[in-house]
Image (tube, grey):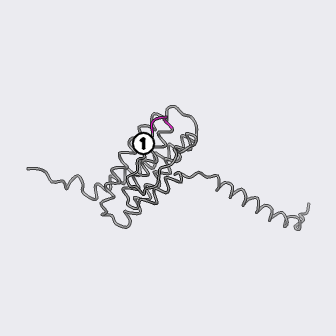
């Protein structure tokens, strides 16, 4: 059997075009972790602690949708602050995946500030807020984990747990490095 290279040559561009279409279609189908309004709030707030507040509230909104509970207040702190917009939509697996992505973004924000200025006072404040939030998320995940067999949900829960572990480790390292517990003045 011989291969007709002329015919194969013409099929190569068609194959490349099909692969590009598939790749672009997959990239377009990917879901953003934050709604457009939440992304606008992240851009609005420049300080680490305010960004962390937005990220925590964004994750809280997703847990409220998942659990069917009242979402956190979206009252504006400043008159020119963007609105929070509508609650996020999606399946339980998508919303859990959003939470994992949101925590990943929080880690990235903290890492960026720590890399530039390890003594920035916003680091400790932000890590405390994140620690409190993620401990609550883990409590909610434990309750959810026993009631699901969906592999997408379980995978998202695993990503959340990995991010929680990183946040708790960073908080512990920051606390130890800054001497928060050992340098407190004791009253005589």
* Residue 94, placed above or below residue 124: above
The percent position of residue 12, horizontal first and vertical second, equals 80, 64
Say left or right for 135 vs 86.
Answer: left
Q: Residue furthest top?
A: 147
Identify the residue at image location x=68%, y=58%: 24
Q: Residue furthest left?
A: 188
- Looking at the rendering, the stretch of residues picked out in magenta corresponds to 66-70
Give the labeled residue for mark 1. 72
Please tell me how crowded label 1 is: few (under 14), some (14-19), or many (20+) other residues with Cα within 10 Å: few
Local SS, label 1: loop
Q: Residue at point 46% right, 60% down?
A: 43
Task: Please give the name of the residue rendered at 34% of the width and 66% of the height, measured from the top-left corner.
Answer: 117
- Residue 96 percent location from the top left of the image: 52, 43
Between 183 and 93, the one nearer to me in the picture: 93
Q: Quadrant of the N terminus?
A: bottom right
Q: Farthest residue toward the front?
A: 79
Q: Is residue 148 above or below residue 135?
A: above
Q: Is 137 in the magenta?
A: no
Number of numbered discs: 1
Frontmost residue, 50 versus 18: 50
Q: Kindly indicate the quadrant of the structure image that contains residue 80.
A: bottom left
- Place of residue 149 in the rendered image (x, y in percent of width and height, measured from the top left): 56, 34
Of residues 4 and 164, the one drawn nearer to the viewer in this rendering: 164
**Does residue 25 lie above or below 97 as drawn?**
below
Q: Main secondary structure of the magenta part?
A: loop
Residue 114 placed where, x, y %? 37, 62
């Amino acid at each position: 059997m011989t291969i007709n290279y002329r015919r194969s040559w013409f099929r190569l561009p068609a194959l490349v075009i099909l692969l590009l279409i598939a790749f672009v279609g997959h990239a377009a189908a990917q879901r953003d972790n934050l709604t457009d309004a939440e992304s606008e709030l992240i851009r609005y707030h420049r300080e680490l602690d305010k960004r962390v507040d937005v990220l925590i509230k964004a994750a809280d909104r997703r847990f409220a949708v998942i659990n069917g509970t009242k979402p956190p207040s979206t009252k504006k702190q400043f008159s020119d602050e963007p609105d929070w917009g509508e609650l996020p939509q999606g399946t339980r697996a998508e919303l859990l995946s959003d939470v994992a992505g949101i925590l990943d973004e929080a880690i990235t924000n903290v890492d960026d500030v720590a890399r530039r200025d390890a003594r920035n006072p916003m680091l400790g404040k932000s890590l405390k807020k994140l620690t409190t939030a993620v401990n609550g998320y883990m409590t909610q995940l434990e309750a959810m984990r026993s009631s699901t067999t969906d592999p997408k949900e379980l995978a998202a829960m695993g990503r959340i747990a990995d991010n929680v572990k990183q946040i708790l480790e960073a908080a512990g390292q920051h606390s130890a490095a800054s001497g928060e517990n050992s340098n407190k003045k004791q009253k005589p």
